[in-house]
Amino acid sequence: MQTYRPYLLCACHSQILLPVMFESESIPAGTAWPEDGKPRTILCMTCMRGRHYSLGDVRWRVSRGNEPQEEEAVLKLTLPCAVQGCPGSFDVNVVAAVDTTRERAMDIAAHILDLSEACSRGQHGFVRAPASAGGVALDIRWLGLRHSKRPPIEDESS
């Protein structure tokens, strides 16, 4: 029996490790993606670019013994569209440690360089958030927790 780890291969050639592992005799099929099967924009923390991925993009490898043991989950950042008057938004998923703070999530949002898709209303209005991210309406939610029941990160200002 081997432990398998699913990942996505970014255009920068980095592996985006998904926050699950499976013990199996062979590569587990179709188990490392949300049940609805819809594509997701996932951020590569190496190049800081978000790209659209789907179940067909998931690859598998045998888990290495030297991989980080921190508990990870998928963090969903919702960023507003920058096209004037557009009510659309961008949903960006990030694999992050479950103890990620709101400040760290804001820092991640502020350093996103590019998103390869249109907003929820079809506009191509992504602009990098200011370094302080102070003016960005950022919604942060945890998805797909593996071990713990961490609640959504709350905005300390509310």
Image (spheres, rainbow, N blue to C red):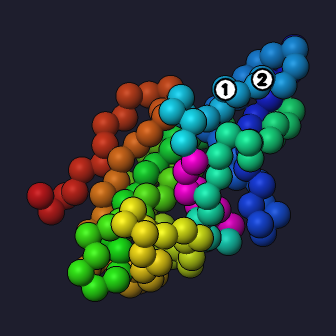
Q: Is residue 41 magenta?
A: yes
Front-most of 44 and 36? 36
Q: Is residue 154 left or right of residue 30?
A: left
Q: Position of residue 128 (x, y in %)?
A: 46, 81
Query: What residue appears at the point 19 percent right and 58 percent down from the top-left corner?
Result: 156
Q: Quadrant of the N terminus?
A: top right
Residue with the mark numbered 1 = 31
Q: Is residue 23 above or below residue 87?
A: above
Residue visible at 53% across and 29% down in the picture: 35
Label 2 – label 1 distance at C-alpha:
6 Å
Residue 107 seen: no
**In front here: 108 or 30?**
30
Residue type for callout 2 = Pro
Q: Is residue 139 visible?
A: yes
Q: Secondary structure at mark 2?
A: loop
Q: Which residues are magenta?
A: 39-46
Q: Nearer the viewer, residue 60 or 81?
A: 81
Image-quadrant location for residue 84: bottom left
Using residue 42 as the reference point, say whether residue 104 is left or right of it: left
Give left or right: position of 119 versus 3: left
Q: Which residue is mark 2?
A: 28
Q: Give the residue drawn at x 62%, y 63%.
A: 51
Kindly give the residue lying farthest to the front in the view shown.
Answer: 122
Residue closest to the eye, 38 or 157: 38
Q: Secondary structure at mark 1?
A: loop
Label 1: how many Cα within 10 Å (few below 14, some 14–19, many 20+): few
Q: Are marks 2 and 1 in contact (CB under 8 Å)?
A: yes
Quick one: quadrant of the C terminus?
A: bottom left
Count neighbours of disc 2 (C-alpha within 10 A) and say few if under 14, some if 14 to 19, many if 20 or more. some
Whether 49 is among the magenta residues is no
